[in-house]
Amino acid sequence: MIIAIDGPAASGKGTLARRLADHFGLRHLDTGLTYRAVAAGLLANGLPLGDEAVAIEHARYLDLAQMDKSVLSAHEIGEAASRIAVLGGLRDELVRLQRSFAETPPGAVLDGRDIGTVVCPNATVKLFVTASAEARARRRTDEMISKGQEANYASVLEDLQRRDERDSKRTVAPLTQAADAVLLDTTKMDIETAFRAAVDIISRAADA
């Protein structure tokens, strides 16, 4: 079973993907972390973010088991990851890695921005998880504050809107809902409600 979950930043897709993986006994991959890991490597070594060959070289030696979300969640790494995500050659290399992960038995839950459209177009079930920009900004702000970080709602909202535009308008694998994906709008849902809705969708698809 391969479950593809796409959606914009802070839509809740990551938390949902992890819970679904546990529920269905599957492995989980946050594909965004693969871009963040490459970006972190480039930043740590003072290398240019626009050098595609160097980025691809970093991707080839990426160890999925060693990606530390607590480290890779830093804002500056996220910004750098969004910038290198437009590099076509790098995307090809990371898609190969992500697809190999998904196709290893017994399957997996992958979340990102192009899972249902590019990485796993033949996934068992596809979800497109979204929420209003305002709801996502509030969640992200609350999350940052809960971790003891400084956060300004207006700045977070502006940042999310900028990332949404960049992700949806890029020429390579833009953020878009796959034609056969089920839309799950979590604007007015808590995580438990969203989880139960997703389980119902996936269970129906698996039984079909």
Image: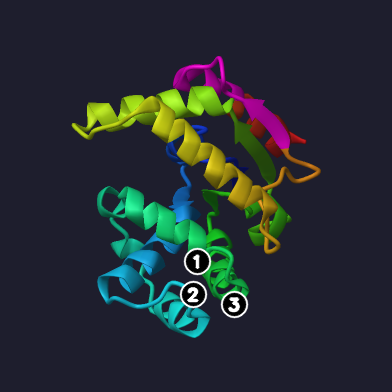
Q: Is residue 54 left or right of residue 123?
A: left
Can residue 88 be seen here? yes
Q: Residue at x 22, y 32 (%)?
A: 147
Mark 1 in CB contact with mark 2 (< 8 angstroms): yes
Residue position for label 2 = 50
Q: Please tell me how crowded label 3 is: few (under 14), some (14-19), or many (20+) other residues with Cα within 10 Å.
A: some
Residue position for label 1 = 84
Q: Residue at x 18, y 31 (%)?
A: 148
Q: Is residue 41 left or right of residue 32?
A: left
Circle 3: residue type? Gly
Q: Residue at x 68, y 42 (%)?
A: 125
Q: Quadrant of the C terminus?
A: top right
Q: Is residue 177 left or right of residue 138?
A: right
Asked if the stretch drawn in magenta spans residue 104, the answer is no
Q: Position of residue 161 (x, y in %)?
A: 55, 38
Between disc 2 and disc 3, the foreground one is 2
- Provide the secondary structure element on which disc 3 rests: helix
Work out whether residue 12 or residue 79 is closer to the camera in this orientation and state it.
79
**Vertical position of residue 49 compared to residue 144: above or below:** below
Q: Which color mode does the image show?
A: rainbow
Circle 2: residue type? Gly
Residue position for label 3 = 89
**Vertical position of residue 200 compared to residue 63: above or below:** above
Give the residues in magenta. 182-197
Q: CA distance from mark 2 to mark 3?
A: 12 Å
Can residue 73 be seen here? no
Q: CA distance from mark 1 to mark 2?
A: 7 Å
Circle 1: residue type? Ile
**Vertical position of residue 156 compared to residue 85: above or below:** above
